[in-house]
Every structure is written in C-alpha cells, then in structure tokens.
Amino acid sequence: MRQIVLDTETTGLDPTEGHRIIEIGCVELVDRRITRNNFHQYVQPDREIDQGAVEVHGITNEFLRDKPRFADIAEDFVAYVRDAELIIHNAPFDVGFLDHELRLWKEDAHPIGILCRVTDTLVLARSLHPAQRNSLDALCKRYGVDNSQRDLHGALLDAEILADVYLAMTGGQVSLSLDIRSVPGTSRGQKDLRRLPANRPPLPVVRADEEEILAHRARLAAIDEASGGQCLWLKVWTR
C-alpha cells in the first residue's frame, strides 16, 4: 500500500484568480512506514506572491527567481504520485491548485482525482473529533506530535508532520502478529509467561455504554476509509 502525504504552498488563496503553487512537499508511506523517499520542489510562479501569503510561509519572489516552473517538474511529479493514495489536510485546496497547474501544463492532463485516490485528513479528523478544532496544529497537540519547528508553514515540513498525525490518528499499529518473541535458552519465551491461578475469582465484565459504542463505530469507519476498506475489526463487528 503506497500513500503520499502531500502539502503545497501558494501565492494566494484561489487558483481561479491566477494564483499558483510555489512549493510542493511529499512524504512517501509504504505499508504505513515512512520511507524517506520524499518529493520536494520549489516552483517559480511567474507572478507576485500576496503579502499575506508571504507572512504565512515566508517564501519570497526573490527566493524563487531561479527555481524551475511547474511545467519543468510536472512529469517527475506525476510519475511520483501516480496510482498512490494522497493524504492531504483540507484536500480541496491543494487538489484545486494541483489540477490548475496540470491544466496549464497540458490541456489533456489528467486531474489528480484520476491519477490518485485522495483522502482528506480534515474530513477524517472531523468525523473522529466532532465540534473540536481540527487544524494541523490542534491535531499535533491532541496526538502528541512535535511541531515545535513550525514557526512558518512549509510544504515538506507540514507533510512530514501530517504523516505523523495521520499514522497516529488511524491507529499506528502496522502488524496484527501476537507472537511471543523467543528468549535465548527458552522455547518461544515460555519462561516469561505468568499464569493466573486456577482458583482465581471471575474477572469483572465491564460493557461499553451507548456513547462508547458509537465512538467505537466512528473510529472503525474512519480506519476503514483510510485503509481502503481493509479494516478487519469492522468486518468482525458487522458479521
């Protein structure tokens, strides 16, 4: 399973007003593991950057003067993301800009939704944490992800942070194996097992209340969506 956590920085807020992408940052996950096979590119937009945008990301026209244009890196970018699942926070924003750049590059270029499957972590976070703040900074605080270097927005840094948030938000566990690791000189670690006495009192059974059941179902649905319908717990739950 190949996933690409993606973020962009732009000259402004709306591509229909001529605003362009100036930075693309991507972090690759394979089977929910960060590979360090990143894609990172600054882009010359051929237009002025709004001052409000500069205050957010700190990228200036002077810095971008010698950077390639999107058309120069488009083929490499498309080859990198093709057939992957894109993980994006507030996906309509980034997808709108990417589709705009692809159309400017080639009139017949496929939109991102054809090249890739897109998962919006903002939608996922809102389903898990309704009526709460679900910005990337808020999610970092909620899941204990370090964002102390995020004084300014940056596409690659934000993609790296979002990758950690996404893995935490969707469970983090990558293996269902419950094997006991062998200990030298023992058989599959048998000496490390502590067995309860046969005459122990019955263990109390604490059943989930309705609120907990609903929260559990919402979490399983979110994991199922994020994993492309591969949530084993949900399949057992609905039998």
Image (spheres, rainbow, N blue to C red):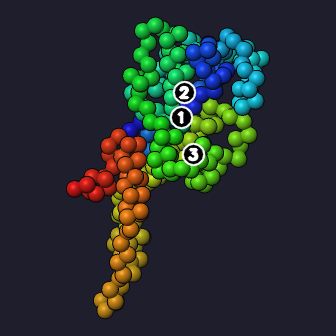
Distance CA(mark 3)–CA(mark 1): 10 Å
In the image shown, does 145 or 34 lie closer to the viewer? 145
Q: Quadrant of residue 26?
A: top right
3 or 1: tag closer to the N-terminus:
1
| Contact check, label 1 and label 2, Cβ < 8 Å | yes
Kind of residue at disc 1: Asn
- Relative image position of residue 65 (x, y in whole percent): 73, 14
Q: Which residue is mark 3?
A: 134
Distance CA(mark 1)–CA(mark 2): 7 Å
Mark 1 crowdedness (10 Å alpha carbons): few <14, some 14-19, many ≥20: some
Q: Which residue is mark 2?
A: 94
User: Could you tell whether 21 is left or right of 53 in the image?
Assistant: left
Helix, strand or loop for disc 3: loop
User: Could you tell whether 200 is left or right of 149 in the image?
Assistant: left
Q: Which mark is residue 192?
A: none
Q: Which mark is residue 90?
A: 1
- For this orientation, the residue located farthest to the bottom is 199
Figure check: 212 above or below 42:
below
User: What residue do we see at 63% from left, 52% from top?
Assistant: 141
In the image shown, does 177 or 159 lie closer to the viewer? 159
In front: label 3 or label 2:
3
Kind of residue at disc 3: Asn
User: What residue do we see at 72% from left, 31% from top?
Assistant: 56
Kind of residue at disc 2: Asp
The total of numbered circles placed on residues is 3
Mark 2 crowdedness (10 Å alpha carbons): few <14, some 14-19, many ≥20: many
Can I make out residue 39 in this image?
Answer: no
User: Could you tell whether 160 is left or right of 51 in the image?
Assistant: left
Figure check: 65 above or below 220:
above
